[in-house]
Image: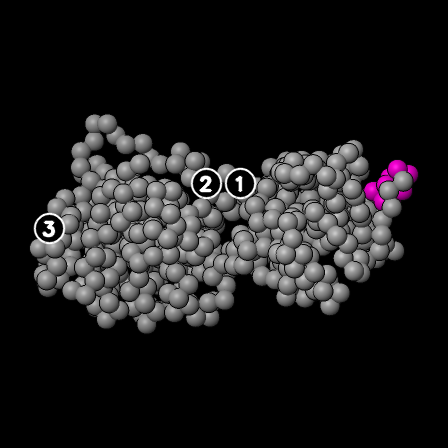
Amino acid sequence: MKRVASAEQIKAYEKNLIEELGVPSLLLMERAALHLYEAVCRMLNAFPEKRKKRILILCGSGNNGADGLALARFLRERKDAELTLCCTGNPDHATEEWKTQAGILSKLGIGIGGFPDPLPEFDIAVDAMLGIGLSRPLDERYQDLIGQLNKRRGECDCRILSVDIPTGLHTDRGLPLPVAVMADVTVTFSAVKRGLIVNDGRRFSGSILCRPIGMDIENGEVLMRWEEMKKELPARDPLGHKGSFGKVLCITGSAEMPGAAILNAQAALKSGAGMVKIITPSANRELLIKAVPEAMYVPAECDDLRLQKELDWADVLVVGCGLGKETAAAWLSKKAIREWPHPLVIDADGLNALAEDPGFLTERADIKAPTILTPHPGEFARLFPEEKEFMQDADRLRALAERYACVITAKSATTMVADAKHVYYNTEGNDGMATAGSGDVLAGISGALLCVCPDPFMAAALAVSMHAHCGDLAAGRYGNAGVTASSLIEALTE
């Protein structure tokens, strides 16, 4: 699985390679340039017409720009490329690596122009202007240049490749400062930079190619891929029985939203749970029996003794889907649930109720009871108002998970799963999954996997990856606009 890293982690990694292990920085640069060359060649080969293509390389005066200069040396071999190099930084303040690369080009007769004004015509522009060190707003010259680049890309049949990260994009937060290059392809090195995949990063980074230039980077952040994640699913026991695969108790649904209970229970069953029991209002009984005959039913009007009996039966509890905030608050106020020592998934209105019950998570943490929260951005903002701007900040998310000894599945276009030690990212799935009931399905999958995965964090991460994979299968069948929660459940059997 690909690693994800912050700017600080990448800098420390490269410093270790160069200073501790003695790998020459120019060797790392050479490897980076070869990966860039391969990517540019694929772009060149994709153009249908046979004329020479105009390649514009925009280089800053740091090592990101030096990568661009090294690339130029390889591209001079292409007979179908017409090369223009421009330096957008100050050569007098350039790094030693940049000066070395510029000296090689000079000996080869390849000139480097100054800051481009106006922007030259191009078919492919290589953005090697600013790398991962950018942390403050761009000056007006850069903003104007990036505006011209993006406008040209939008109006003409031309493409942009960014080196490591699109210029103007914050490396960790994925926010433009205040503008960023709109790349078609970003070739990044050693690890996927956080900013490429969080917040607005995916709008600017295009297709992300992560390429090695040294040893593997080691940290706790991972970019999930279903083809790899599915290998982590626990093997089913061929001699097992329904009790072997877990018992999920779902406190879900209301008279107004019975579908949430149905979708949640169906998802849990289709994800492998051995038994599912639903606590829901009596008004839903007949509907649920028809829609989910495999599930058992308990009236929500039951007393606390019956609730305790059902909790004693269950391995995993799911609370919140379709309940309504007041009803969810009433359930979560019950001592039996607050003191239940087994995995608890809280979704939807359960999360909204928690926003007004700050003691709940602390009480669960005190007894070391596994709790999995699955907020979307609105629920996250209500639950953690002081952190609402940092939902996709890996360090802040991990700190929250540590504070409350829980697992947080922060749902968005890039979903992040965090506990006190790990952060996993998911960019699979599609916009069709932004549909009613999708979260109920994820909560059901999470409940089923918590029955068989000893590690709550891995269960939550597997659930997100499986859910996204189902979204892509459903979109392949119905198109993105045709994806429904029911189609996600259909895909669970594929």
Circle 1/circle 2 CB separation < 8 Å: yes
Which amino acid does the dot numbered 2 rest on?
Answer: Arg
Task: Give the dominant element type of the magenta stretch: helix, strand or loop.
Answer: helix
| Residue designated by label 3 | 289
- At mark 1, the secondary structure is strand
Bounds of the magenta segment: 101-108
Q: Earlier in the sequence, mark 1 or mark 2?
A: 1
Labelled disc at residue 225: 2
Number of residues whose C-alpha sits closer than 10 Å to that of mark 2, classed few (under 14), some (14–19) or many (20 or more): some
Depicted 352 relative to depicted 467: above or below: below
| Residue drawn at 34 percent across, 69 percent down | 355
Camera-nearest residue between 328 and 87: 87
Alpha carbon distance from label 1 to label 3: 44 Å
Depicted 116 relative to depicted 51: above or below: below
What is the quadrant of residue 413 in the picture?
A: bottom left
Q: Position of residue 42 (x, y in %)?
A: 64, 37
Residue 385 shows in the view: yes
| Residue designated by label 1 | 2
- At mark 3, the secondary structure is helix
